Structures are given as structure tokens and as C-alpha cells.
Amino acid sequence: MYGRWEEIIRDEIKDGVIDGAALLVCDPERELFQYACGEAADGVPMSCDTIIDIASVTKVVATATALLLCRCRGMIDFDAPFTRYLPDFAAPLPGGPGTVRDLALHIAGFSHENQPKRQYLAEDGGELLRNTLRFPPLFPPRTHFEYACWNYLLLGQIVERVTGRRLTEFCRTELFEPLGMTDSSLGRPVVTDPGRLAQTCGTNAPGEISDFAAFHVYRDGGCAGNAGMFSTARDLGKFCRMLLQGGRLPGGGMLFPEARLREFTVNAMPPHLPEKRGFGWVIRDAYRPESASDQIIYHSGWSGQTLYIDFGLRLCVVVLTTRRGDYERAKCDRSRIASLLLKKFTVGERVE
């Protein structure tokens, strides 16, 4: 028995909350710990090399990072109106257009929770993307926080407009390959071997995208910035270690200057809104691990994944699960697991 975190995982499997889990802990230089338990798919054991759809973790690992690379290269101004980069946005804008940063913070006014259905949804992926340019935000920018995939569907299109490249290709050549993330991709897994693939909730087979919007967009030839990335615990550990090293690449050189990491790590929310978020990343909410320092960032995916990068403790924790039950319990439990592992690997602290 490793400790309380293993009990949490085994209880979740027993209760039908998840089918399997893969955990990884890293410091800036190396992997410190790995663990896997349960199934990735029927008859397929979970491992730290299992390729899994990471759902909304795509927003930060792929889209927000791609945008930061674009900013470092002078292609984009985060504080410019987003319509500068999407001039074909055709809907009215109450209070004027939000900025690129507002989209990343989910405060540009777009909403779907307050609608009978998400206005942009369509069975055809091309129409779905076009719809994101047709419907107005419900609120003036910077007056209302609402987590909405709509924002990142727009941001993914912005990456493509400013780079002149597909989001899949830009992330592959400018992010995944430099970091040695050979098992990571957007839209579809890099392999078809069923022994390597996880099946996430809401899908018909291993290796499919769980998010409705991203599934249809990629199926019909487009790219989605909100979800649809496939990766492994080990690949995500490489990404997290790069952040802990201030943007440094494994073979030397920098992916981006360390000072630019402040975009991810410093709260950029207006003071009248209670949420604490950097560019894409959560800084503090109800799911912050109890043992974390005040310099942690994290993000979750609805199908059961969370990344935690703690710059104060110089540790990262990757928790990938194949959720099939209680969303709230699963998300809370991932935070509890991360808290236990952060404490275990902090100098001078150990848990049984």
C-alpha cells in the first residue's frame, strides 16, 4: 500500500467513478514517481504511457501555450480586441469587443450555461466554427466570469489566423516536437494500437475525443482550441518540467523567456470578480490542493484529468483518469491526490 492517495483511487474504481488512473510527479529535472492502476479501456491496463484524450486540459497545454509563443514572436497583442484577429466576427458586441486576454480568462462575455442550448453547437464541424463568429456575447466584457469552451474555439482560430498554419501543425512543430512529446497530438492519437489507447466518457471507442464540439470540428476537417488533445502522463510531465524550468527546452535553449511565464502565473482577473486566474490557468478556486504553495497553477478536463504545477514547491503532479461517474467527486478526489503527493515529495514531509 502506497498511501491514502492509492486508497482514493481504488475506492473510485470500486464505486464506478473511474476505470483507471495514471499519476506522475516531477521536479524540474526528472520524474520522481509514477503509478498506474485500473483499466484504460476494456481489458487494457492503464499506464503512464497510455494515450488519453485530455479534454479541456487542451486549453492550457496547447492553445494558451501556442498563444504565448505567438506573443513572444510579436504576432499578437493579448490586450488588443479579439476582433483585430477575427475581423469576420459578425455579431453585435455589447460594451465593445473583449480582448484576446478576456477570451483566455473567460470574461469576454460569452455564455452558454444561461442558454437553452449552446448556441454555437451544430452537427457539422465547419458550421459549428462559423457559428462562433455569428452569435454575440451576452455580457459586456470584464463584467461576468463564465467558463465556456466558446472562448477557446475562438482562440484556436486566432492562432491559425496569426500564424497562417493549422493549430494541429503549429502545436506539433513548435511545442510537442521541441519538448520531445512524441505521444502528443491534436485531433487524433499518434498511434492506433488499442493497447496504448484509453477510452474516455461519452465516446464509442478508445482514442476518440470526448468533447462534443471538438469531436465534430476535428471529424469535419477543422481544428478546435477548447479540447481534442491526446497525450500521456509522461509527455505531460515533460511539459510541466519545462514550465518549472522557466521555459527551458530539454536540449538547451528556451521555448519562451522565463519572464513571459507571468502570463500563466499572475492573477489577471479584474478586482471586482472573485475568480483567480492567469492566462488560461486556474490560480485559486475550490479545487486547489490543500498542501500547495501560493504559487500553483492548474487546469482540469471534464473526462477526468488535472495538471498541477507548483512553482513554490518546485513540483508538478499529473493526474490522468478515465472518469465514467460522479464529476464532482472525481474532481475533488484529484485535488486530494495531488495534495497528498505534493506533501509527500516536499522536502522534509512524508505521508504514509
Image: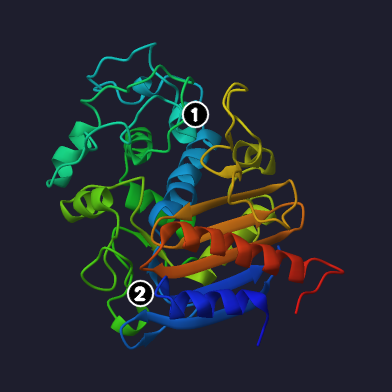
Q: Is residue 177 above or below residue 67?
A: below
Instruction: Give the farthest residue toward the top.
Output: 95
Q: Is residue 220 above or below residue 88?
A: below
Instruction: Name the quadrant of the C terminus.
Output: bottom right
Quadrant assignment, res 209: bottom left
Which amino acid lies under the numbered mark 1 shown in the image of this protein? Arg
Quadrant assignment, res 108: top left
Residue 46 visible within the image:
no
Q: x, y percentage for residue 139?
A: 38, 20
Judge from the rendering whether residue 43 lies leftward or rightward of residue 54; answer left or right. left
Which amino acid lies under the numbered mark 2 shown in the image of this protein? Ala
Q: Residues within 10 Å of mark 1 (few under 14, many from 20)?
A: many
Residue at 21% in and 48% down = 217
Which numbered disc covers residue 283? none
Q: x, y percentage for residue 78?
A: 50, 27
Residue at 30% in and 81% down = 193
Q: x, y percentage for residue 93?
A: 32, 15
First-in-chain label (1 vs 2) = 1
Residue 300 visible within the image:
yes
Q: Is residue 202 above or below residue 103?
A: below
Display colour scheme = rainbow
Q: Which label lies toward us, 1 or 2?
A: 2
Instruction: Name the quadrant of the N terminus.
Output: bottom right
Q: Secondary structure at mark 1?
A: helix
Q: Residues within 10 Å of mark 2 (few under 14, many from 20)?
A: many
Which numbered disc covers residue 101? 1
Which numbered disc covers residue 198? 2
Q: CB under 8 Å between callouts 1 and 2? A: no
- Which one is in front, 256 or 34? 34
Judge from the rendering whether residue 192 lies leftward or rightward of residue 144; answer left or right. left
